[in-house]
């Protein structure tokens, strides 16, 4: 019997068939962010699946859909928390041009980010609960707004994490199959310049050009970035003006900030919020409307990674680790000091695109790996 068969009681072919069958159900139930009806309906489907495994499920209704928390076991020990999200960036109807298929790749909207990871998590629980009571309580938290900032789920995530022993996040792995022991923090700022309009041909000297004001800030904020610490600032959107013959009185831009440490996030925030107009008669308004802390590579996170690496080695895989500039809800739990291991999902690529896919051959290993990880932790 192979190590994989010993871990899950299935051949590689049977494991693949089992995972892809469940994944098909979830992918073919489209769940775009902001679509409360579709996200809520999928949450109810998953809740029924988890109840079928013996989980006690609580549904949290929010304006954008439904979050759910499923609890397995109540033996008094601190629970292990597994987190996933069911929302995707793909609009309803994407399935028509991007259908669910299985060959050497699994395709379909949201299959990679992150319905495959969510599926593996549930299949691992199905295998373990069929064997008897779990050695420690496990909580499953599935949210419906991760792709749009986790605004309604953040209090729930932080509340559940504070009582957890550790957190596992089956977001997609790194391209080399590695787990994520570091994620940059993410913040988004809106900078609005208010000037004074005037006719561009008759009396431009009476105007205060808001676009010109903003253009100077676009150049200036480049100095806030710090490549040495991995801090980047990207002016990602800009808009302004009302007509070609009017000096604009209003202009707005957004800035995407990525930072590797909490300290860098504070520094950037202070510098951006302290910006003042270049033109004495202009007015500048700076607002931060998105903020997610970094997942920093701490000793407790590396210790959790080493345990995972040992388990992967038993299955014949040398599990690497690394970092990424993208954010996830794992950053929220890590910022609380709770040991968090992210990127436990399968290999693949094309997240948020029409060529999103999962590598089919990776699924049996991921199922066995996640099952053993849950069992050992």
Image: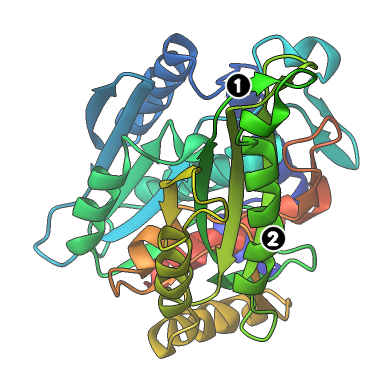
Q: Which residue is mark 2?
A: 365
Q: Is residue 143 above or below residue 360?
A: above
In the displayed structure image, the side of residue 247 where residue 376 appears, left or right: left
Which badge, 2 or 1, is on the more N-terminal residue? 1
* Residue found at the far left of this picture: 76
The residue sitting at 79% across, 34% down in the picture is 353
Residue neighbourhood size for the residue with mark 2, other residues' Cα within 10 Å, grouped as few (<14), some (14–19), many (≥20):
many
* Residue found at the far right of this picture: 104
The residue sitting at 63% across, 55% down in the picture is 217
Q: Which label is found at residue 153?
A: none
In the picture, residue 16 is in which quadrant?
top right
Q: Nearer the viewer, residue 7 or 30?
A: 30
In the displayed structure image, the side of residue 334 where residue 188 appears, left or right: right
Q: Nearer the viewer, residue 301 or 63?
A: 63
Mark nearer the viewer, 2 or 1: 1
Q: Which residue is mark 1?
A: 25
Residue 342 in the image: x percent, y percent? 52, 64
Q: CA distance from mark 2 to mark 1?
A: 21 Å
In the displayed structure image, the side of residue 246 where residue 259 appears, left or right: left
In the picture, residue 180 is in which quadrant?
bottom right
Q: Is residue 90 above or below residue 14?
A: above
Q: Secondary structure at mark 2?
A: helix
Q: Is residue 110 above or below residue 73?
A: above
Residue 79 shows up from this direction: no
Q: Secondary structure at mark 1?
A: helix
Report the quarter where the C terminus lies.
bottom left
Report the quarter where the N terminus lies.
bottom right
Residue 119 shows up from this direction: yes
């Amino acid at each position: 019997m192979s190590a994989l068969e010993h871990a899950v009681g299935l051949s590689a072919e049977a494991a693949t068939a089992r995972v892809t069958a469940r994944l098909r159900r979830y992918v073919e139930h489209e769940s775009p962010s902001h679509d409360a009806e579709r996200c809520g309906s999928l949450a109810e489907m998953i809740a029924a699946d988890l109840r079928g495994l013996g989980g006690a499920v609580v549904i949290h209704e929010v304006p954008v859909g439904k979050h759910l928390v499923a609890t397995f076991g109540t033996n008094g020990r601190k629970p292990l928390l597994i987190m996933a999200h069911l929302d995707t960036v793909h609009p309803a109807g994407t399935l028509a041009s991007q259908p669910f298929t299985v060959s050497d790749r699994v395709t379909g909207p949201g299959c990679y980010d992150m319905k495959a990871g969510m599926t593996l998590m549930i299949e691992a629980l199905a295998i373990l609960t069929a064997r008897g009571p779990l050695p420690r309580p496990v909580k499953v938290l599935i949210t419906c707004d991760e792709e749009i900032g986790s605004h309604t789920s953040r209090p729930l995530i932080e509340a559940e994490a504070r009582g957890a022993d550790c957190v596992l996040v089956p977001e997609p792995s790194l391209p080399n199959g590695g787990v994520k022991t570091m994620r940059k923090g993410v913040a988004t700022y809106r900078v609005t310049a208010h000037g004074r309009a005037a006719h561009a041909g008759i009396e431009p000297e009476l105007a205060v050009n808001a676009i010109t004001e903003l253009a100077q800030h676009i150049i200036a904020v480049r100095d806030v970035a710090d490549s040495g610490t991995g801090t980047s600032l990207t002016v990602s959107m800009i808009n302004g003006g009302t007509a070609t013959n009017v000096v604009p009185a209003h202009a707005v831009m957004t800035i995407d900030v990525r930072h590797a440490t909490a300290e860098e996030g504070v520094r950037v925030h202070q510098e951006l919020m302290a910006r003042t107009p270049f033109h004495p008669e202009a007015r500048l308004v700076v607002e931060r409307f998105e903020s997610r802390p970094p997942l920093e590579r701490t000793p407790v996170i590396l210790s959790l990674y080493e345990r995972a690496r040992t388990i992967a080695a038993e299955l014949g895989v040398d599990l690497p680790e690394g970092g990424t500039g993208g954010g996830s809800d794992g950053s929220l739990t890590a910022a609380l000091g709770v040991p968090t291991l992210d990127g436990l999902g399968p290999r693949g690529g094309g997240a948020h695109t029409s060529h999103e896919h999962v590598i089919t051959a990776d699924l049996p290993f991921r199922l066995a790996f996640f099952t053993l990880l849950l069992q050992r932790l």
